Amino acid sequence: MVLIINDKENKLEGVNWPNLVIFDDPCKVKTYKRGSYVVVMLGASVEDDGKLSGYDYMFEELLITLDVIAIITTADSEKLAELCGHYHIPLISVR
């Protein structure tokens, strides 16, 4: 499964693929399908306090709730790197 998290101002819509989930509401995370996820962060970042930018949601909750096997990001974050290191999740930065 692929989970796409983008910055809140530029929401992706109209994508309906069975193995793709668009993050739009933190409350829905617990309803996502079971399985391994690659998280793609497009413009979204993890702030120094651990919150996902633009949301009132601690990014670590996502790592605890889902089986995240890799994270691909377009916005580097020291906190994201710290969390990935703690949970042994590969972090790929794309510019």
Image: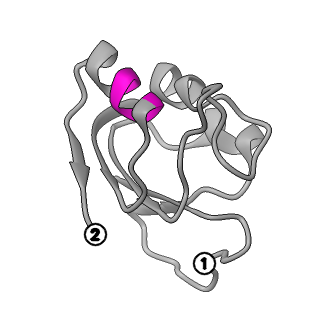
Q: Secondary structure at mark 1?
A: loop
User: Label 2: which residue?
Assistant: 95
Bin the neighbour count of mark 1 within 10 Å (Cα to Cα): few under 14, some 14-19, many 20 and up. some
The amino acid at mark 1 is Leu
Quote the CA–CA distance across marks 1 and 2: 19 Å
Q: Are marks 1 and 2 in contact (CB under 8 Å)?
A: no
Q: Main secondary structure of the magenta part?
A: helix
Tag 2: residue type? Arg
> 85 and 17: which one is in front?
85
Q: Nearer the viewer, residue 18 or 68?
A: 68
Residue 86 falls left or right of residue 10: left
Q: Nearer the viewer, residue 18 or 77?
A: 77
Image: magenta residue range: 79-83
Q: Is residue 82 magenta?
A: yes
Question: Where 62 falls versus 11 (above or below)?
Answer: above
Locate residue 32, reporting x and y percent.
56, 43
Which residue shows up at 64% across the image and 81% down it? 13
Q: Which residue is at a point 34% across and 37% down the rendered structure image?
A: 35
Residue displayed at 51% across by 65% down: 43
What SS does tag 2 mark? loop
Place of residue 50 in the rendered image (x, y in percent of width and height, measured from the top left): 60, 27
User: Is 72 in the magenta?
Assistant: no
Residue 44 locus on image (x, y percent) = 55, 57
Give me the residue at 31% from left, 17% from top. 87
- Numbered badge on residue 12: 1
Q: Quadrant of the C terminus?
A: bottom left
